Amino acid sequence: MLLDFVRLMRGYVDFEIIGSFPERFLNITARNHIFVWNTKNNGVYTASMYISDYMKIRKLARKSKVRLKVIKKHGVPIYISKYKKRMGLAIGLLVFISIIYVMSCFVWTIDVSGIERVSYSKLMSTLKENGVYIGTYIPNTDFSTASRSTMLEIEDIGWMSINATGSHLDVEVKEKAEVPELENRETVCNVKAKCDGVIMDMEVYQGKTLITKGSGVVKGQLLVSGVMEDSFLHSTLVSANAKITAITKHEKLYSVSKIADAVFVKNKRIRSRASVFSLEIPLSFSPSDVKNSAINTKIESAKMNGVFLPLSKISENIYPFEIVKIPISKNNAEKLLMKYSYLYETFSLCDANVTNRNFELSESKNAFSLSVSYDCFEDIAYREELKVDENADLSYHREDEKDK
């Protein structure tokens, strides 16, 4: 088998020996250390010989008074000589295969799965800092070390694996389970009022109630005590908890200057560039340092058979703007202040039921102001930890006090 492979690589010919003394020719080739094989005599002598030896055997054939005739040529040199005029095609094929091999050593695409709370952009930037990005040279990259370093930098990641399949990377992430906030029922708490109000309803789950329905309370007033007394007037510390619903009033003042900053957008500019792996090539020559501008970036990636290639076009729409001082009319100021009021109600009073609103618009020399009063129906209870010295004794006996 090995000998057949060597013969194919060197190239050989099958030839016919024509003449009166073919045996003499074979003896001369043996004396000159020329290897001949596959000799046959079926009325005509035939044999096989390496091409390089066949080119030298002509003189020996004339001495033996025989004539040689080629029957068939075999081997790689024959194919090379046959297609030597098309050598450019072979070289191009070789160069193409080399380019494909070299390109397969780099990361073309990265697919991330398993993230919900972790930001995709933060994960990709952290991976890039640890040497994993589109264009990374795969043989010189330690993906295990990169994944461990990324997990240490992003606390929400509990496990991560980076698997390379050809030029594609699969980044699998498992986030840490969120630890639920459990209420510590052993903590001694009082229930206090978070704002002024008139009590309309009470649901006391634990603790000593210090108020009644219909009574008015002020911010910070103790509503339910975490210190309870039993029938023997012994004090016990508990974690007080309650829902206290009250009618409350919130007042808020909003103001806006009569002279405001307005933004005017100038002519839009377009800047584009091509991205090949991590190399960016500018396709336009718009200035990159436009002062006071907003930029909208669009990335179009090349795709083949459902796989994104590391070739993309990045287009940036640049909107230069100018800040100009303009006066605000009373009507526009009122609309703006009303929006402020609704935003405050949406975010700051989201837990309260607003039953009524009173608006009062006023004007000064330099500004417009809106005073808003919100009538609400809400739970005003909040729990505050009661800190007691561990050596304190809260128990007492009224009988002892009477004796005294």
Image (cartoon, helix red, strand yellow):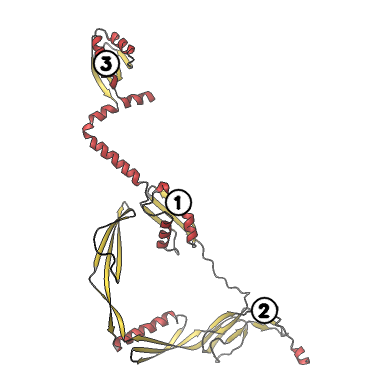
Residue 121, image x and y in percent?
40, 62
Vertical order, 299 against 2 (above or below):
below
Q: Quadrant of the N terminus?
A: top left
Relative side of 47 to 392, left or right = left
- How far apart are the alpha carbons under marks 3 and 1? 62 Å
Q: Which SS class for mark 3?
A: loop
Vertical order, 359 against 315 (above or below):
below
Residue 160 in view here = no
Q: Which SS class for mark 2?
A: loop
Category of crowding for the residue at label 3, using alpha-carbon neighbours closer than 10 angstroms: few (below 14), some (14–19), many (at least 20): some
Nearer the observer, 206 or 235? 235
Vertical order, 87 against 148 (above or below):
above
Give the mark, 2 or 1, whose residue is nearer the N terminus.
1
Residue 299, image x and y in percent?
30, 60
Q: In this figure, which residue is indicated by the disc labeled 2? A: 389
Residue 193: quadrant of the picture: bottom right
Residue 318: quadrant of the picture: bottom left
What amino acid is labelled 2 in the image?
Answer: Asp
- How far apart are the alpha carbons under marks 2 and 3? 116 Å
Q: Which SS class for mark 1?
A: helix
User: On residue 143, which mark appears?
Assistant: 1
Q: In this figure, which residue is indicated by the disc labeled 3? A: 57
Category of crowding for the residue at label 2, using alpha-carbon neighbours closer than 10 angstroms: few (below 14), some (14–19), many (at least 20): few
Give the mark, 3 or 1, whose residue is nearer the N terminus.
3
Q: Quadrant of the C terminus?
A: bottom right
At 43% from the left and 49% from the top, the residue drawn is: 141
